[in-house]
Image: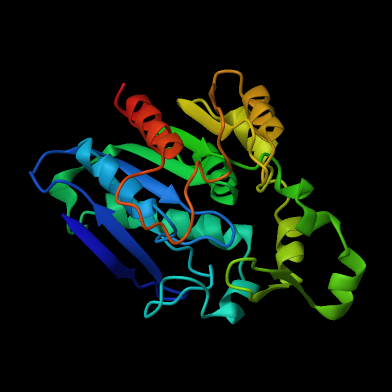
């Protein structure tokens, strides 16, 4: 059973678009929730193939667009809504992940007979990895954590450390999207929200608190987020498992669009390792 582009309506916040992948067999399956990264979306590259691989391993796989990632209900791929993108921040993404957890464990969830609400793994890629770490440290419903090519400290990202005075003066700054060529706006509220919630948004502090099983997967040659950040995460939590990926990149050999019908080798290995970790 593959259900694409379901809509989670929320009373006071933007809706969330999500997909579910699972074998419809009335057995209680572990839940896996996938969080995309910066300038990402649930349908990027080979994420559908990733979802099918988890489904084939008898897992209930959910992937979603963060509410302010720049997509819309009508166009969940790419970034038609740059006004929403400009108003995104880490707190909103944490709230979005909480909303997804809430709907999945709800008594009214459409597929409640297919899931085990007491066995929930969150996987986060890149910036989504940081969000996953933060949420896992504060939400006891999450029972396992996996980060793929995750950042280790939001406060050290270039967005947070460069041109702050100019950013404050202008109210907005732009980052070019190399693929779509769009000028992606970041309103100054992004920085203000981070500073106002700095303790909650500390990945190092959150990682140190995590007591559930934690797998860190990262390419040693990642050109976007250094492998040193994976080593930092492992150092923050010495009970975690660090799994280096050789001869690969930030997206484990994938790209967008992905025209192949099979996963790139590195990503296939990452999925296999992740499934073994979840089902062990």
| Residue 9 percent across, percent down from the top left | 35, 73
| Colour scheme shown | rainbow
Where residue 262 sits, quadrant-wise, is: top left
Farthest right residue?
Answer: 165
Where residue 250 sits, quadrant-wise, is: top right
Q: Residue at x 28, y 41 (%)?
A: 53
Farthest top residue?
Answer: 239
Q: How many marks?
A: 0
Q: Nearer the viewer, residue 158 or 262?
A: 262
- In what quadrant of the picture does the N terminus appear? bottom left
Q: Using the rendered image of the protein, determine whether residue 108 is visible from the camera's viewpoint.
A: no
| Residue 243 percent across, percent down from the top left | 52, 24
Left or right relative to 225: residue 41? left
| Residue 97 percent across, percent down from the top left | 46, 54
In the rendered image, the vertical position of residue 112 relative to residue 53, given as above or below: below
Q: Residue at x 52, y 60 (%)?
A: 40
Q: Residue at x 20, y 48 (%)?
A: 22
- In what quadrant of the picture does the C terminus appear? top left
Left or right relative to 112: residue 132? right
Q: Nearer the viewer, residue 133 or 266?
A: 266
| Residue 242 percent across, percent down from the top left | 55, 23
Q: Residue at x 38, y 77 (%)?
A: 73
Q: Using the rendered image of the protein, determine whether residue 103 is visible from the camera's viewpoint.
A: yes
Q: Nearer the viewer, residue 108 or 144?
A: 144
Farthest front residue?
Answer: 260
Left or right relative to 252: residue 265? left
In the rendered image, the vertical position of residue 89 relative to residue 104, given as above or below: below
């Amino acid at each position: 059973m593959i259900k694409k582009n379901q809509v989670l309506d929320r009373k006071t916040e933007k809706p969330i678009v999500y997909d579910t992948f699972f074998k419809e067999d009335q057995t209680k399956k572990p839940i896996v929730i996938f969080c995309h990264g910066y300038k990402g979306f649930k349908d990027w590259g080979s994420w559908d193939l990733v979802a099918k691989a988890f489904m084939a391993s008898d897992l209930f796989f959910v992937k979603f667009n963060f509410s302010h990632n720049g997509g819309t209900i009508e166009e969940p791929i790419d970034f038609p809504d740059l006004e929403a993108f400009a108003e995104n921040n880490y707190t909103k993404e944490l709230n979005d992940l909480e909303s997804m957890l809430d709907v999945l464990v709800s008594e009214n969830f459409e597929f409640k007979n297919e899931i085990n609400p007491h066995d929930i793994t969150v996987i986060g890629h890149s910036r989504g990895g940081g969000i996953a770490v933060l949420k896992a440290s504060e939400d006891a419903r999450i029972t396992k954590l996996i980060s793929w090519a995750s950042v280790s400290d939001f406060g050290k990202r270039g967005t947070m450390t460069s041109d702050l005075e100019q950013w404050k003066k202008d109210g907005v700054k732009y980052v070019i999207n190399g693929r779509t060529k769009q000028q992606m706006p970041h309103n100054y509220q992004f920085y203000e929200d981070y500073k106002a919630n700095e303790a909650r948004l500390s990945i190092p502090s959150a990682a140190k608190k995590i007591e559930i099983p934690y797998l860190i997967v990262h390419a040693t040659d990642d050109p976007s987020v250094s492998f040193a950040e994976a080593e930092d995460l492992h150092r923050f939590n010495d009970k975690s498992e660090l799994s280096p990926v050789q001869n690969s990149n930030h997206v484990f050999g994938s790209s967008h669009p992905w025209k192949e019908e099979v996963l790139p080798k590195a990503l296939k290995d990452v999925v296999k390792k992740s499934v073994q970790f979840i089902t062990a």
